[in-house]
Image (cartoon, rainbow, N blue to C red):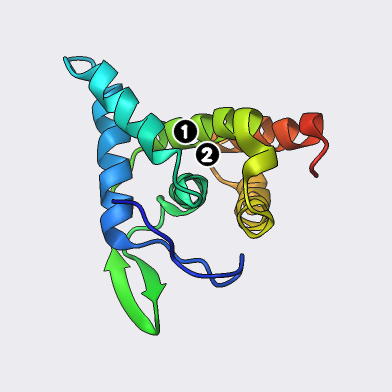
Amino acid sequence: MVSGGGGGAAAWQPQEEGLREICGLLEQQMAPTSDDKSMIWQRLQQYSQFPDFNNYLAFIFAHAECEGSVVKQGGNSKSWKSGISVEVRQAAGLLLKNNIRSALKTTPPANQQYIKSELLPCMGAADRQIRSTAGTIISTFVQIGEL
């Protein structure tokens, strides 16, 4: 289950279990043979009720390309080997954009700040799809008047 990482924007760190769950759902949602798309979509929508779900999406979008990246939790470091495709990262970004559009006003300010801090470096990503999606998410912030 997705649960909180920390207090402030700088302190927030994802939990490895939550990363695996959300990445797995995004991968299943994109699978062309998935018969359970509506169930998967419902689970993603249920997760969107957690205050830090969008933080997870931002983390997946911004960091999943880092093979063997280190996730720090309460002083402990854990290795998270992503192997996440650009398509899954982009799906996380687009879901983040939709969530921002529909619920930014109810998102805690610390979470908003974390998401913004993760998005800006993505504008310089090597992959064009990631840069484009980052621009789309940032423009959503601008349209809402929160950037």
| Residue at 24% from the left image edge and 22% from the top image edge | 39
- Spatial CA distance of label 1 from label 2 is 11 Å
Residue at the bottom extreme, as displayed: 75
- Is label 1 in contact with label 2 (beta carbons under 8 Å)? no
Q: Is residue 61 above or below residue 128?
A: below
| Residue at 34% from the left image edge and 78% from the top image edge | 77
Under mark 2, the amino acid is Asp
| Other-residue count near label 1 (Cα within 10 Å), few / some / many at <14 / 14–19 / ≥20 | many
Q: Secondary structure at mark 2?
A: loop
The label on residue 5 is none
Judge whether residue 59 can be spotted in this image: yes
Label 1 vs 2, first from the N-terminus = 1
Nearest to the observer: residue 137 or residue 128? 137
Nearest to the observer: residue 86 or residue 45? 45
Q: Residue tagged by mark 2?
A: 127
* Residue 63: percent from left, percent from top: 46, 54
Q: Secondary structure at mark 1?
A: helix
* Residue 75: percent from left, percent from top: 39, 85
| Residue at 61% from the left image edge and 28% from the top image edge | 102
* Residue 82: percent from left, percent from top: 30, 52
Judge whether residue 82 can be spotted in this image: no
Quick one: quadrant of the C terminus? Answer: top right
* Residue 26: percent from left, percent from top: 32, 33
Q: Residue tagged by mark 1?
A: 90
